[in-house]
Amino acid sequence: MAVWPAWAAPTDEVLKHHGTDLAAGLSSSEVEARRAKCGYNELQKAPGTPLWKLVLEQFDDTLVKILLLAAAVSFGLALFEDNPDESGVRAFIEPLVIVLILVLNATVGVWQESNAENALEALKEMTADTAKVFRDGQLISDLPARELLPGDVVEIHTGDKVPADIRVVQLKTAVLRVEQAALTGESVAVAKSAGPVAQEECELQAKECMLFAGTGIASGACLGVVNSIGMDTEIGKIQAQIQEASEEESDTPLKKKLDEFGEMLAKVILYICIAGKAAAAGWAAGRASTDTCSGPSAAVPGLHCPAALRLPPPLAVWLINYKHFLSWKPFPGSWIPDPSTVEFSVAKATFYFKVAVALAVAAIPEGLPAVITTCLALGTRKMAKRNAIVRQLPSVETLGCTTVICSDKTGTLTTNQMSAVRLVAFGRSLTQLAQWEVTGSTYDPDGGAVLGLAGLDRNLEALAEACALCNDARIEYKAGHHRSVGQPTEAALLVLAEKLGVPGEAAQRQIVRARQADPEASPTGACAFHASKYEKLATLEFDRDRKSMSVICSPSPAGPGAGAAGATPRRSGRLTSLLGGGAAGGGNVLFVKGAAECVLQRCTKVMLADGSVVPLDKEARLELVRLLDGLAARALRLLAFALKASDLADLADFDGSERHRARKRLADPAQYEAIESDLVFLGLAGLQDPPRPEVRPAIEDCHAAGIRVVVITGDNKLTAEAICRSIGVFEEGQALEGSSLTGLAFAALPDTEKREVLSQPGGLCFSRAEPRHKQDIVRLLKDMGEVTAMTGDGVNDAPALKLADIGVAMGITGTEVAKEASDMVLADDNFATVVAAVEEGRAIYNNMKAFIRYMISSNIGEVASIFLAAALGLPEGLIPVQLLWVNLVTDGPPATALGFNPADPDIMTKPPRRADDHFITPWILFRWLVVGSYVGFATVGSFATWYTSSSFLGIDLSGDGHTPITFAQLRDWESCRSWEGFQASPYTAGSATVTFDHPCDYFTVGKVKASTLSLSVLVAIEMFNAMNALSEDNSLVQMPPWRNPWLLVAMVVSLGLHAVILYVPLLADIFSIVPLSLNECLLVLAYSLPVILLDEVLKFIGRNFVNKPAALPAKAKED
């Protein structure tokens, strides 16, 4: 339902609209009526995806569909075909292994998907559990927050979590401050009031009379009326946006490319199978028997027939060759078939089916999904070492093609830790206005210093006392980090006081040593020293009119240094010279802190460096005003410090008791401005949420890499622009018209103008942005074809994090909502880590291309070997169980090791690839086919060489006693039984002898050694091919194998596994192979090594003609 704009209505109208009484709240009867209409104050959860649907979604992938059909065909043939060579469990090895791989991949996918929607549960944790509510005139202190209703009167206090969206109707303290950075992105606690705002249509930050569910009360108390509950609250809208973004999630660039690759590969298989029909037809024509199906395809169960094909390869072969197994005669004088003459040969139909499948048996690498998953998993480990924790595996690669990084400001580009960056005070005269730069961007007192500070003069000592005393925050050290407890601005002043230190080098060194020895016990020794000089008697709270706060303090009888860890007690006589007669007489001191322009107006005197107090003349005041204007232009938050030690009237001897005559005056906030008059000016401090020091170099790296940076923040425009200039998103002096807009201004633009703004070169800044604005920007960028990474830490960032191609959340300051909605979490909250992750993502993509190039060229070689054997009419050299071993086991380690290839040195000086760039170019496909053709030639060649030669290139092959035959005989092996006088001698294989009952079994049972040679050549040639894949175009001379030692280890492992199945009799029998002698191993090398020379030639052509590299940028050369 529409939310009533209570923020634009006066208090009495709010109460009237909601039909409630401020003193009594809702009645019981009204509660029942509203409950039936409004329901409960809780966030709704969309129905979860059923487990069965999650499982099915894992199989909605082209490659997976291909493997599924392959497993089904293989299982069917193994089940129904009576083949003595493939019996028992062995016949089902292939379908079982394929199904096992798919099940494992699906299991991982389901686990990831089931954890993806935890953001909604994390949102629920942000909402309050109970609330203090007035009902029937009674205060219920612990009403469950889910039972709140619009119109409920709620009491809110410091430390409470706001339970619903509430309209403030009455302040119970002078000031009410709310921490709502997680919702709006504002870097400091914001003040709230009971007055309405001028416009109904305004951003969340402008709704100063509204408290939003999930935010926290930093200080103060109030009464409010619940305006909206549940999904109608701002946090409820965010949940709805997260759910909407989840439905809009699109495939990652990697998945799109793999799907495209799978479709292309399926078409290639179709073409291969169609091309194979000619060889199959010629082969079938020479067969003597038409009743049995023997030969190469007999031992090859169907393995790879893609579901993605519109016309499955076996069907294509059947239709093209139908005349070989289906014939008929037409009626006389007509083309119409005579049904009585139709003849169908089941044996031949089965044969053509199996020939087509045999040609496709190795085209799809079964291990590719597993290797891709492994490579991405390895990438996540490498990123984790660089403080980027990846929650979704495909996100690893998505980073590599990121073209735009949309970054939140607070906590990402900045530290989200307010820090003093500038200090101003007068020197020894009014003509000496000194400025100091303050370094450090965290709450660590030792993480920076006041540059150029020679020592602590009396004026700066008084300023440090004001920082320590006008303060309700504290610094604590936990889990290796200094953090603030209380308002960030006040915590920054404590750190400033620590950097100023205490008088005396020995005392200061003692404080620093105590802090470094035990930071938990002594985080702020200097502040403790300064505070120990006084006893705080009363606090004049901040209000929006005078924009200042102050404390009344009495000099401590114990003297300075009492209770200060590591500090040396000092004589209290120094107070006399610092504070003047009032303090000398034991009178109280008023320390004041507030907005610089307001405090300066109430100052009439100035304390100089030597502690003397002089009148503030007109020229000095004008100089201060000019300085204020200059610092304000840098978007610094300026605070002024002052004191008052005389003319305190009845406050001069105030002792803090309730009966003192000054108590009545202190109880009236209207008196505060008069009390804070005729002040002594001490100095100024300029504060900001400082940029992280490493962000600017990271932004420069983004520019060099062709990545645009867009800053989207909820902070005000001036602050956002100043930060963008300081980190390099904008250049100094750059005109920002059209490059810096508020969220509302951008939302008001027509769609065409929005696209023009987002498409302009250079950085952009969007300030005062609400969650819906962030979503709109990300959605438009994606529609424009950009690959968008979105960083953020607050609840307000969660919908955009979910919608972006890759959402990046902050690990330290990030809310659980943001983390659960993200794809990646930064362990160090550092924007520079995002850039490092982009570099890693690019390297991972290149490595992924390397192992896909390696695997596909090898698999094309396997296809070529079967195609060549079929075309020449040779016995099959490789059976499916051997191909499966090569694809899953032997190829796996080298392919995985290619994921460890070092990144190219100029990887971050190249523009990002577009998401729609083709994974496979014509040149890459040509290289695959050339290398694959050689692999096919080598495997078939080694097979034929053993049958036809007793020696090859000087290698003696006659040692085993096999019978050489002619190549013509080998091609006509199926006619063996018609040969007159053919004899084949038994031969040795290791310690065994291969014998056969009939000489013609030499081509079936006796082919075991030739088949072993083919398999060994395939394994060896793929090891050398893995070395070729180290670089797409660089020679092995430039990129030697030892650049990736993991590849060498993987090659040793693969060759070792091959040796195991060769020389372990049980395994050799399973894979139908036999041991090889030394000379036979040399034959394997003779056929395998030339693949390196062949690929070197292709690389030379590639780097000099096809992919001619551009000149390397100077920065990359230096790197």
Image (tube, rainbow, N blue to C red):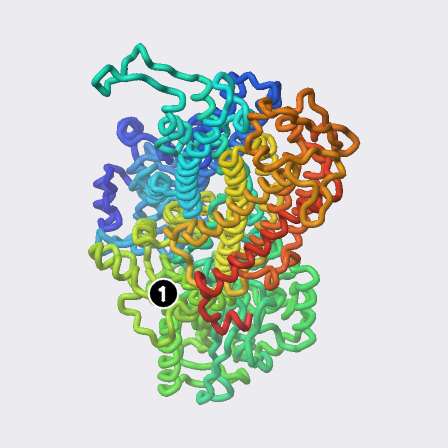
Residue 373 in view: no
The spot of residue 948 in percent (x, y) is 64, 38
Q: Quadrant of the C terminus?
A: bottom right
Amino acid type of the residue that numbered disc 1 sits on in the rendered structure = Gly
- Residue 1022 location (% of width, % of height): 60, 46
Establish if 73 lies above or below 1092. Answer: above
Horizontal relation, residue 626 to residue 299: left or right: left
Q: Residue 594 appears in which quarter of the rendering?
A: bottom left
In this view, the residue in front, 377 or 1040, is 1040
Please state the horizontal and vertical placement of residue 440, each as a whole percent of the image.
Answer: 54, 68
Residue 84 in view of the camera: yes
User: Which sits in the foreground, 1066 or 399?
Assistant: 1066
At x 37%, y 36%, the residue is 43
Which image quadrant: the N terminus? Answer: top left
Check disc 1: other Cα within 10 Å, few if <14, some if 14-19, many if 20+: many
Q: Is residue 963 above or below residue 409?
A: above
x%, y% of residue 1021?
Answer: 61, 46
Find the residue positioned furthest to the front. 980
Q: Identify which residue is drawn at 41% across, 52% down.
A: 922
In the rendered image, which residue does mark 1 sit on? 763
The residue drawn where x is 66% and y is 24% is: 999
Residue farthest along the right direction in this orientation: 991
When asked about the image quadrant of residue 670, the answer is bottom left
